[in-house]
Amino acid sequence: MDVKLETSWDDLPLMANTSHILVKHYVLDLDVDFESQIFEGTIVLFFESRNRLEKQSGSTKETCRSESNEACRFSTPEPCHSPVTDTRTSSSKTGYNDFAICGKGEKDTSGKDGNHDNPEQASGISSSKYCCDTGNHGSEDFLLVLDCCDLSVFKVEEVDVAVVPGIETFTGSSQIAFVSEELRNQIVHELVTLPADRWREQFDYYAHCSQAPGCGELLFDTDTWSLRIRKTGAQTATDFPHAIRIWYSTKPQGRSVTWTSDQSGRPCVYTMGSPVNNRALFPCQEPPVAMSTWQATVGAAASFVVLMSGENPAKPTQLREGRASWHYYVTMPMPASTFTIAVGSWAEMKPEICSSEDLAAETSLTPSEADFRCVGVCGHMEYPCRFQNPSATTQEVIPHRVFAPVCLQGACYETLLPLVRPCLSAAHSVLGTHPFSRLDILVVPANFPSLGMARPNKEKTGHVSDSGSSVIKHGLNPEKVFMQVHYLKGYFLLRFLAQRLGDDTYFAFLRKFVHTFHGQLILSQDFLQMLLENIPEEKRLDLSVENIFRDWLESSGIPQPLQTERQARAECGLARRVGAEVHKWIRVSRRPQKRKRRETEEVFEKLLPDQLVLLLEHLLEQKTLNPRTLQSLERTYQLSQQDAEVRHRWCELIVKHKYTKAYKDVERFLQEDQGLEDSSCWGATDMLVSRHTALGGVLRLVTCTRYLRSCFQPRMLLWQAMGIYLYGELMVSEDARQQQVARRCFELTKEQMDRSSAQVVAEMLF
Ligand SMILES: [Zn+2]
């Protein structure tokens, strides 16, 4: 009877039973220890059981604010449907968990909606499956399932929120006579549903509650992917404690954070968008439906800087000798996977033009009470939103800080700092109001794995079980990081739409889109639908959501519109000039080697870096190029001193023609340009790769990317990915000396590579 979600080795399961209960707020209190490479401390979670919850999606947010608990019906389409509810509500004690979904004693009026909304799920779910999903074999207690891996959990306890001074106001009486589970949950319910204009009070109470003593340990166990907690006798999510504290520590090998060193050689640690998201940093609910706020206090040795996603520009508070703590908070509910932290010995790079008065003026725009009532423009759940604050909406440059290793100070002042304000201002002019009140910019170590996130999105990632758990297919595949074709296609689709509609129409729409959907999870379909509804008929032409999906997202290979564009580009002047140079080089290469009388020397034109890339791409198509030609090529363009993209093509030529004299250039590329040392790559887009494992796959990959490269801006390549291709090319040649180069470089650099890259390369090499 043990029916489980079907998973394969590389799928990422999301175990949290978000259909029953949702985390509304996290309070983290952690210490970072670089010696043992762990975070250790507590996390307090504040819950709302789903039957109390309002409808998540937008406009009906106000409906149940003031109503009593049971009056607010669970009405999202997902897991509440009649087959389960019907049988269980009438069969008393045998069914327990179903009450957690739909509320004890509720009459089933939601059943018909549930059925219609999601017939697929409604039909396929049996009660046995349901039990197994939550791992609740035979027990009558409600089981809280949190996403969690690589954590050592020491203790789980209920928090006695009723003892917090002043909290009795939430119970509607002046003092608390008798404390029951129900009362504590009532208090948490009132706290998590406070209106947005009382967010300061709410966050103060969260902090006080998180310090309150425990009032009973809870039973728990862990498995590979989850932490399961229950309380004897609490049979439904409604009865389960709504504020719990977990004592735990991370493990050095945990996959949510990378312990490494920065460019100055000092230790640092950061979340890097791991495939397992944040579940190896703190136990959480990963499905994005669990939108929560958080506050976190992190203690570290005083020489360290602690940065986090947060709305306040935290400053360190001195603790005991040599230790300091940093406190951050976020009032905008977001999926737990968006929580970020970075701790290191970085220096703040302060721009001279930005005086402290500027900063003070800017910071004063963090949410203040009374300004915020989510009416009018806001379709999201309630929070103190900047779109409601007139002075925030006109703020072009939000407060920001730049942190970097000391050794990069010069480069930061010279290159990075002058760009930040214009970039923020440009973002504001294109997209409108900055959704966050401030920003920390950190120059990350070279092994930062970039955009390799396997974030769950709003769209179902596979079968979603009755409890809310699901699976991200291939979410753990280490190659996945390099297979983000969807990001790349997305980028080019947007570019295509901008060209088709014209910048004015397109950007006006983009602004409107952000305004409409800020603070909400949305689908690509929503975006396209809104776009098509908002553009004039004559510009829409043959565009439809279906067409766009078919041509851009569902089809494999290069979308047709891009192929057309590529042809057009090949005919432009800059590319034609490259064509002429290519012919000269081919002539040079075919010339007999020993010739007494010097023929007229070829005169080569100067080429721009992009043209050089194109030239080398063309030359890569040549079957043979002799060493003499390669040498001359190197000298003519000083290839080993060009940028990484040019050098990468140069390295490919070296490898292809076994030009041993220049193997040092390949080694240098693999050792120095493996990571993302240049921020120009940042945020561009991910590299596209098909499959890596088999060497045959590498070949296909190389062919496919070479073709794509010549059609795309080379700048978009992530250098990291380029290094990996080069490893592939060195190995696929089956040339002993080349393989030796690959292995030697890998030995020297693997410690600095991010884990996924290292794993992929190791598979190729050994
Ligand atoms: Zn808003």
Image: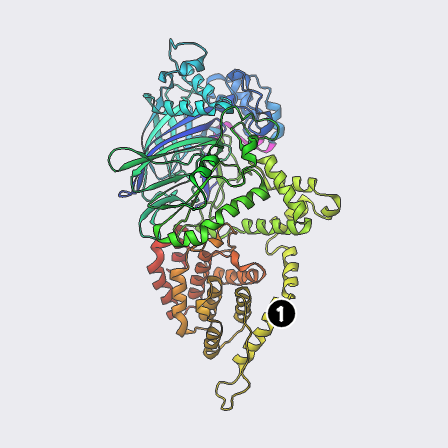
Name the spot of residue 331 as percent of width and height, x first.
47, 30
The residue that label 1 is drawn on is 576
Res. 122 image quadrant: top right
The color scheme shown is rainbow
Rendered residue at 49%/50% (across/down):
419
Looking at the picture, which amino acid does disc 1 mark? Arg
Predominant secondary structure, magenta span: helix
- Decide: is 419 above or below 210: below
Is residue 314 rendered to the left or right of residue 61?
left
Magenta span contains residue 121: yes
Q: Nearer the viewer, residue 236 or 759?
A: 759
Crowdedness near tag 1: few (<14), some (14–19) or many (≥20) residues, C-alpha within 10 Å: some
Name the spot of residue 309 as percent of width and height, x first.
43, 38
Res. 345 image quadrant: top left
Q: Identify the image quadrant of the C terminus.
A: bottom left
- Decide: is 752 above or below 455: below
Q: Which residues are magenta?
A: 119-129
Name the spot of residue 49 as percent of width and height, x first.
47, 23
- Decide: is 418 above or below 671: above
Rendered residue at 41%/63% (across/down):
669
Q: Nearer the viewer, residue 244 or 322?
A: 322
Q: Nearer the viewer, residue 739 or 598?
A: 598
- Name the residue at the right extreme: 538
